[in-house]
Structure formats: C-alpha cells, structure tokens
Image (cartoon, rainbow, N blue to C red):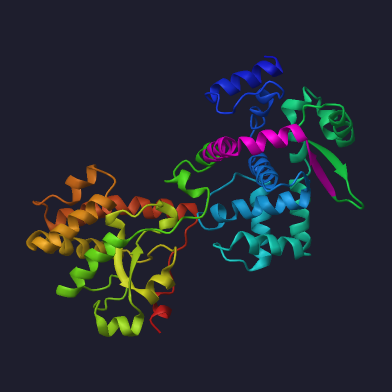
Amino acid sequence: MAESDFGKDRLNGLNCMLPDTDDLPVHLLAGIFRDKNQSYKLFWFQAILDAVCEGEVVITYEQLIHRMVAESWYMVMEYHLNLGPADAMEILINQVRDTSGLLPAAKKEEIIQFLKTSNDENVKKAKQKLVLNVPYRLQAPFLGKLSDKEWRDFRYIETKAMQDARLLYYYEQLPGKARQIRMNEKWVGYLQKNEAIIRGWIQNEIIQYLQRRNPNVPGIPFKIRPPEKRDLKSAMNFWSVIIEHHQLKDIYTGKTLNSENFNELGKMHIDHFVPWSYLTSDEIWNLTPTFAKINISKSNQLPNRSMDIELLSKQHYDAFRIAQSNKEIGKLFQKYKRKNLNNPDLEGRLYSTEISEEAFIKNMDTLIQPICQSAKNQGFMEWENRKIALR
C-alpha cells in the first residue's frame, strides 16, 4: 500500500476525526501513531500540542520530556497502569520515582521542577534514551520510506527533513548537546484552530494503547488524568443517619462509629474498600464509613485481612435491613442506590428484599474477591499499617 493511501485509509478509519484542509497533508498527520510499540509517540505529540497551544513554536527536547513525564506520572504512579515491557517512558518515570521522593499524586509543576534541577545520572540516561528516536520516528509518515541504515543516521534524516515543507517541525542544534524543534508555522495554525478535536484524538489513542497493555484493568478512560473531586454526598447522608440511630462498627478497627471515637480518630469519612484509583467509580457495595485517621492511613491500599470482606458485607446487610424497616432511611437508601449502583445485575444479587444474610455475604465475596486480586496483580499494595494508624 502506498504511503499516502495508508494515511487516507487510517483517516477514514478514524471516521475523519481530524479536520481536512487543502494546504496541509492531514492524512500524513493521521498516520503518526501507526506503530506504537512504546508510548513515547503519544506523549511526545501531546506535549507538542500543549506547548503550541500555549504559544510556543520553538521547544527544546528537555521541555517536551518534562511535559511527557508530568502528563503520564499519575497514571503510572497512582493508577498503576503499565505502559509496556521496557517502555522508555515508564523507565524514566520509575527513575524519577526512585530519586525524587515525589508522591504518586504530585502536581505537574513539582515533577517538572524536579526534572529541571536533577543531576541524577540514571535520570539523565533515561532522558537521553527517550529522545534517541521519538523526535524522528513520530514524523515517519512525512519522511517516506527509509532503510534501517538511514533511520540510524539522524544527520541524514535532519538534512532530508529540512527539504520537506510538509513536516510538523524541524530539528535544530543548540550549543553543546542540547537540541530543539521548530514548529512548521502552517501546522501551528492548524493545531491551535483544531485543538479540541486533536486532543480528543490523542486521548482516544492513549486509551486504546493503555487498554492493550492493561487488559484486566477497569475504567481505563478515566485513568488518563488525575480525578476530579468526587461527589459522595448521598453516601455520607445515608451512613450518617444510620450511625445516628443505630450502633455501627468500623470494619477496620472494630470501634463503634460514635462521637467519642470521632473525637479520637477524626470525623467520619467514606472509604473505598477497593481503592478508587483501581475501580474509578463510587459503587455502593464498595463504600464504607470509617474514621478520618483510618481512611488517610489506608489511602489507596487494599485491605489485607481475609475477614474484611465479611465484615464489610455484614455491615452493608445490616444497613440494608435498617433501610427496609425505616421509611425515611429507606428513601435515603434508594437515592444512594440510584446514584451509586451502576450494574443493574447487582440489584437482584444484593438488594432483593428476600435475600438472606448468608446469601448476601456470599454474593459480596464473589464480587469483591476477584477485584481485590486483580488490583493486587496490578501493583496495588496491601495495607499493613492499620495498627500504627490507631496510635
């Protein structure tokens, strides 16, 4: 298949997602993600788009690398997503993790500041490896068919590129070993004008890439960026009323959820039994009231006692029965369930008026055990410090 035909076919495959224009080869742009053995093309182009839309047309390799790490940090560190075996981006992120002391939820500004000032040799080597090919490989559809020998000769590629008015950007040498790209002004206008569409296209490509690399992980589309603030108002309202009228114990400490213990261990929090950063949803069966100190200590870790699922199940069953016997609490429960139960199959498996406690506990265990194991396989750690949290 000819190069131009491939690009046009790919553009058609994207349902013409990228707006066409007479003076630019958009079909070639549509082919830049054709070969994605590693993630760097995706994040390199996304970093370029971010910079261009902020008004930059001359961008150093270093600036782009810093943007790439900052953009992908949260999905790797907090969501534990794999970018792929021996992926150059993930190697660099892990090097930054090992040397920076940055938290998984670190802000982009903190990550970029560390990268600007770090003199760590392993970080430097990982950066160099990352830019060895990506500035050239991204533009493969524009450069035409090159032999393996020609691909290894970056001077040849740069010379060839300077003669081609269609390219996205051109390569410039700075004093020393530093390098930068200079954007093609025609493409600058196109990227800025169509930013929203192009950004959606990149995100779609990232989601598809991550789904292939993480086939058993739920909620991939919600894991390409840090979460927005979550709304747990319905959960808080329901559990607050339950606690106000009935003695209810915290499943992690065995302590009664009452004013005396709230004074000692902090106000009531709603905890995600399986970390939100794995499920990326606020399912009713996965939420439990606890103390602030306990919730903060547990963070995005998994419970580490086999009995915890049983305790969670009994707590939920008791609350469900209370809601059935009290009209006002029942209304709160129905509102909570409508907002926080997204799988209709669970309506009958868990919230049938005829279900026994034994059946409820069994169904909860069948639901949650595999999820916990899958999260553990993905790299989520078990919570080992519950005793320390009580001190």
State whether residue 39 is above or below residue 264. Answer: above
Q: Nearer the viewer, residue 78 or 31?
A: 31
What residue sits 24% from the left and 43% below the top?
A: 344
Q: Nearer the viewer, residue 15 or 42?
A: 15
Residue 355, position as x, y percentages in the image:
11, 52
Residue 265 on the magenta segment: no
Residue 5: quarter of image: top right
Residue 351 visible here = yes
Q: How many marks?
A: 0
What residue sits 70% from the left and 35% below the top?
A: 189
204 lies left or right of 65: left
Residue 66, position as x, y percentages in the image:
70, 54
Quadrant where the C terminus is found in the figure: bottom left
State whether residue 126 is above or below residue 85. Answer: below
State whether residue 74 is above or below residue 264. Answer: above
Residue 345, position as x, y percentages in the image:
23, 42
What residue sits 50% from the left and 43% below the top?
A: 214
95 lies left or right of 313: right
Residue 168 visible here = no
Q: Nearer the viewer, residue 241 or 378?
A: 241
Residue 191, position as x, y percentages in the image:
66, 36
Residue 186 on the magenta segment: yes
Quadrant where the N terminus is found in the figure: top right
266 lies left or right of 153: left
- Residue farthest to the right? 175
Q: Main secondary structure of the magenta part?
A: helix
User: Which residues lie in the magenta part?
Assistant: 179-207
